[in-house]
Image: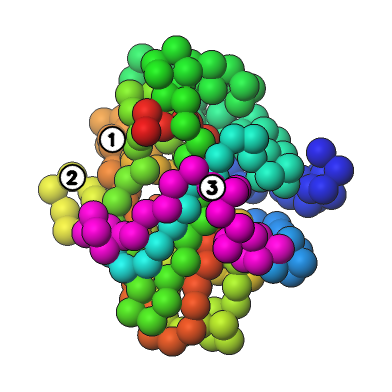
């Protein structure tokens, strides 16, 4: 808890909750220190930390590479996953209530993992991504099995405009019977973005309706871009 207790304490979770309800995403500035970002990037080349490396081109996911961490997760990642989840579970529960979906999420992360394990989802989904020139990530949703948590986070490990150009984070919002809306974000080094994995409720004249969201990354023009993705459910494979 020590590594990040200060940031957690200083974060205005009521504000984050409002942002999530209003837009489906929220940012915590400077969640990680420069040093923490640099250490995560340095660890990218240590193979023992990861269970699987994916060349994104191979699966037509885009262009770039990512690595799934192995359990046990590095201390800082473990702490973030355990301590952020309880702040997000009430948001997810409010969304499912609003959309009249008969499912609620446990308030502790450990319990969500137990549900995943009972469904044979045992593999860590936390990943670090690296994109070079022309690198990009096509629009997607990170669902890894029947048991999923509908909110995830990504941390930006280097500086846009300095370490790389291009490579914006893109959210696409698909409203029923309307054209899709693109939301383009440029978070800075150390920032944490929290966003919906698949959908969110929006209030209409006849109650709440469901708006689908996907995310991706636009093409990197120069340099290298690194991110750390924390997904709260585990994967089948
Ligand atoms: O690199 C990014 O900004 C997006 C990464 C991503 O798709 C994820 O963390 O799920
Ligand atoms: Fe993703």
Q: Is residue 59 magenta?
A: yes
Compared with 214, 100 (above or below) is above
Which tag, 1 or 2, sits closer to the chain's start? Answer: 2
Marking on residue 50: 3
How is the rendered protein coloured? rainbow
What residue do we see at 77% from left, 67% from top? 35
What residue do we see at 64% from left, 60% from top? 43
Residue 80 in the figure: left or right of residue 169:
right
Which tag, 3 or 1, sits closer to the chain's start? Answer: 3
Residue extending farthest left:
177
Image coordinates of residue 139 in percent, x first then y, are 28, 57
Q: Is residue 231 magenta?
A: no
Query: Is the stretch drawn in magenta largely helix, strand or loop?
Result: helix
Label 3 environment density (alpha carbons within 10 Å; few <14, some 14–19, many ≥20) = many
Image quadrant where residue 236 sits: top left
Residue 31 in the figure: left or right of residue 117:
right
Residue corresponding to mark 1:
209
- Tell me whether circle 1 and circle 2 mark residues in contact (CB < 8 Å): yes
Label 1 environment density (alpha carbons within 10 Å; few <14, some 14–19, many ≥20) = some
Q: Nearer the viewer, residue 39 or 27?
A: 39
What residue do we see at 35% from left, 37% from top? 143
Compared with 10, 111 (above or below) is above
Q: Which residues are magenta?
A: 39-61
Label 2 environment density (alpha carbons within 10 Å; few <14, some 14–19, many ≥20) = few
Which tag, 3 or 2, sits closer to the chain's start? Answer: 3
- The N terminus lies in quadrant: top right
Image coordinates of residue 212 in percent, x first then y, are 28, 44
What residue do we see at 42% from left, 53% from top? 53
Residue corresponding to mark 2:
176
Image coordinates of residue 7 in percent, x first then y, are 78, 51
Q: Secondary structure at mark 2?
A: loop
């Amino acid at each position: 808890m020590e590594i990040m207790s200060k940031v957690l304490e200083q974060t205005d979770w009521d504000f984050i909750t409002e942002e999530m309800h209003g837009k489906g995403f929220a940012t915590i500035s400077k969640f990680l220190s420069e040093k923490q970002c640099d250490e995560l990037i340095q660890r990218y080349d240590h193979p023992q930390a990861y269970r699987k490396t994916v060349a994104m081109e191979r699966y037509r996911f885009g262009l770039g590479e990512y690595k799934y961490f192995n359990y046990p997760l590095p201390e800082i990642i473990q702490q973030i996953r355990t301590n952020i989840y309880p702040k997000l579970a009430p948001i997810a529960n409010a969304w499912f209530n609003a959309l009249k979906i008969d499912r609620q999420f446990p308030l502790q992360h450990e319990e969500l993992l137990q549900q995943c394990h009972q469904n044979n989802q045992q593999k860590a989904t936390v990943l670090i991504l690296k994109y070079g020139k022309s690198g990009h990530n096509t629009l997607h949703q990170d669902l890894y099995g029947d048991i999923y948590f509908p909110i995830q986070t990504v941390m930006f490990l280097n500086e846009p405009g300095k370490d790389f150009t291009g490579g914006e984070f893109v959210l696409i919002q698909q409203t029923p019977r309307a054209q899709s809306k693109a939301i383009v974000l440029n978070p800075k080094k150390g920032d944490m973005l929290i966003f919906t994995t698949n959908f969110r409720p929006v209030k209409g004249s006849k109650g709440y309706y469901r708006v689908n969201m996907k995310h991706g990354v636009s093409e990197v023009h120069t340099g290298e871009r690194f991110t750390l993705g924390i997904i709260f459910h585990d994967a089948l494979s």
